[in-house]
Structure formats: structure tokens, C-alpha cells
Image (tube, grey):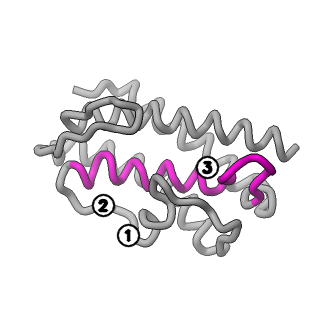
Amino acid sequence: MMTENIFEIMLQNRRNLHAILTKTPKEKLLKIPEGFNNNVYWNIAHTIATQQVLIYKFSGLQMRIPNDLVTKFSKGTVPDGTATDEEMMMVADFLISTAEWLIEDYNTALFQTFNEYTTSARVTLKNADDAIAFNLFHEGLHIGQIALLLKQLA
């Protein structure tokens, strides 16, 4: 069973990402620095898409965000350096709502089945608890990448 602290850490990470997304100038969010293959915005949106795939899709459930967002920001994609203001506002909203929905769905025991999956980090996820824990690690990696990108853009 997940501890409340795991969820609180997840929510705080998402609040931090939300602050970066809403307080950083758009051109900085979308710029891909030399030597990098992505930008701050892609990393933020990628955390949402990945959470939905790892936890909802592998549990055999409907993801809570539009499929086109998952397609655009999934593993293996690269940003084109553009985004509409509408899309960016939607991503900002999903940062918090997808975290809150996950907590609600977890607490109502929605996650009953899981399709075992081995990540590119060679971690095998056997259930939703594993996926939630791994997702926290994954988001931490991207928060580090975002910090590095922001430093390059300073």
C-alpha cells in the first residue's frame, strides 16, 4: 500500500513543475539549447504522459488525458520547439489534476490489474504500487534535466 508521503512528494514535485511552467517565459520553455534534444516544456509535459502510461494504461484503464498529448510527449519523442498557449495551459492544469486524480483513483482501489512492464532503466513493474514509485523516480530525473536546461538558458 502506498504511503501518504509518496503522494505528498508527488504533489509537491508537480507544484514545483507548475511554478516553472507558469512563471518561465514561453520562449525559454520552448528553447532547445545547443547539445540538447529537448526543452523544459517537453520535459514537463512528458512527466504527465508517462504517469498516465505507466499507471493507467498498464493497469488496463482509460488514460485521463487526450491521446494526442500522450503521443506528442511519450518516450522517444522530441519537441519541435512550438506549443500553443492553449496546449501549455492544458499541460499546466494536468500537472495538478492528474496527481489529484491518481490519489483519488488509488484510494478507491481502481487499480486492480497490471500488465507487468520492464522499464528502460531495467526496473520491472509488477503492479500499480511499483508504477507509482517508479514514476516518482522518473519525474525526479526530469526535474534534474529541467534544472540543467534552465541553467543553460540563464
Q: Provide the secondary structure element on which disc 3 rests.
A: helix
Residue sitting at x 66%, y 53%: 38
**Position of residue 140 in the picture relative to residue 103 (left or right):** right
Q: Residue at x 46, y 52 (%)?
A: 75
Q: On screen, 38 above or below 1?
A: below
Residue 67 is marked as: 1
The label nearer to you, 1 versus 2, is 1
Q: Which mark is residue 18?
A: 3
Q: Quadrant of residue 91?
A: bottom right
State the mark number for residue 63. Answer: 2
Image point (25%, 41%), residue name: 117
> Disc 3 marks which amino acid?
His
Secondary structure under tag 1 reads helix
Residue extending farthest left: 112
Q: Identify whether 75 is placed above or below 14.
A: below
Q: Nearer the viewer, residue 44 or 36?
A: 36
Quarter occupied by residue 81: bottom right
First reached walking from the N terminus: tag 2 or tag 3: 3
Q: Nearer the viewer, residue 53 or 12?
A: 53
Give the CA separation, mark 1 to mark 2.
Answer: 8 Å
Tell me: 102 left or right of 60: right
Mark 3 in CB contact with mark 1 (< 8 angstroms): no
Is residue 49 part of the magenta span, yes or no?
yes
Q: Secondary structure at mark 2?
A: loop
Q: Earlier in the sequence, mark 3 or mark 1?
A: 3
Q: Position of residue 106 (x, y in %)?
A: 24, 42
Q: Provide the major secondary structure of the magenta segment.
A: helix
Badge 1: residue crowd in 10 Å (few <14, some 14–19, many ≥20): few
